Image (cartoon, rainbow, N blue to C red):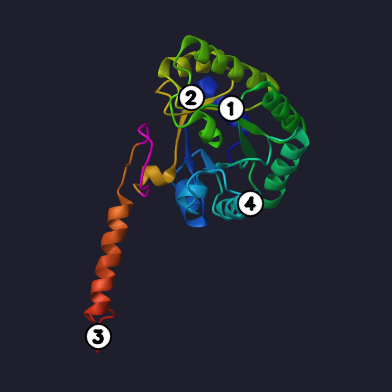
Amino acid sequence: MAITTQQLIQWKQQQRPIVTLTAWDYAIAQLLDAAGVDIILVGDSLGMVALGYETTLPLTLDEMIHHASAVCRGVNRALVMCDLPFLTYQESSQQAIHSAGRILKETGAQAVKMEGGYPAMVETIARVVQAGIPVMAHVGLTPQSVHQLGYRQQGKTPEAGEKILLEAIALEQAGAFAVLLEHIPAQLALQITQKLSIPTIGIGAGVHCDGQVLVTADLLGLSSRQPPFAKSYANLQETITQAVQEFSGEVRSRQFPSQQP
């Protein structure tokens, strides 16, 4: 049975941690779903890991829809959620509703994720939720603001931490079903998690969040560089390189295909 946003909120109450990973195509999505992942995020990180952009900023809505559609075709159980790409929701609430609506209509995803907790974004998220579209909010380090924030940890001073806490509270009040906390101090993440009745999903935010997310390319060891808070559970770069080199050697030495009797 497919996971719902209501189920995620129940899991927070039950203190059952929520597992989130990213996917960018059908094959990866199938594997993650079969392995029992709770949320599959079609993150704008696909702009870097699948399309080769330097940052997430160039990714378009059409590219997101193309990849999210493939992901949804591979998923039966997990909740599929999509990032709204840069400048597809920041201009106005009408633009955000249109972009989020296209994702739900054209891909089969159940929710979207939007970065930022400033007052105008809180109002936009409220309007998107009122239109019937589930939204996960995202505060702390927001990669679409890379040219403004860089990739530094956020919320390190008491004032900065208080600002992020107040943003998270406002986003819950706006109707977000969960909040992603990226690259903030663990103690601040704990404070936010205890304050909210909706789940917090952490990445580089310590152990106290209601769930954790990683970019799957980082987890599998496919990334050329990864953030310090990521962990690789495999080294597929090495495995794939060795397999390709072995195949190449066999072709060049005429060992592949094997001689038929």
Amino acid residing under circle 1 = Ala
Q: What segment is highlighted magenta in the picture?
A: 222-230
**Label 4 vs label 3, nearer the camera:** 4
Q: Earlier in the sequence, mark 3 or mark 2?
A: 2
Q: Earlier in the sequence, mark 1 or mark 2?
A: 1
User: Where's residue 177, x and y in %?
Assistant: 62, 28
- Asked whether the residues under the numbered discs 1 and 2 touch, taking CB atoms below 8 Å apart as contact, a structural biologist would say yes
Q: CA distance from mark 3 to mark 1?
A: 58 Å
Q: Residue furthest top?
A: 158
Q: Which residue is mark 3?
A: 259
In this rendering, would 198 be left or right of 219? right
Q: Above or below — where is 235 with respect to 190? A: below
Q: Earlier in the sequence, mark 4 or mark 1?
A: 4
Amino acid residing under circle 2 = Asp
Mark 3 residue element: loop
- Asked whether the residues under the numbered discs 3 and 2 touch, taking CB atoms below 8 Å apart as contact, a structural biologist would say no
User: Where's residue 233, x and y in %?
Assistant: 32, 42
Q: Residues within 10 Å of mark 4 (few under 14, many from 20)?
A: many
Mark 1 residue element: strand
Q: Which residue is mark 4?
A: 65
Question: Between 68 and 84, which is closer to the camera in this rendering?
Answer: 84
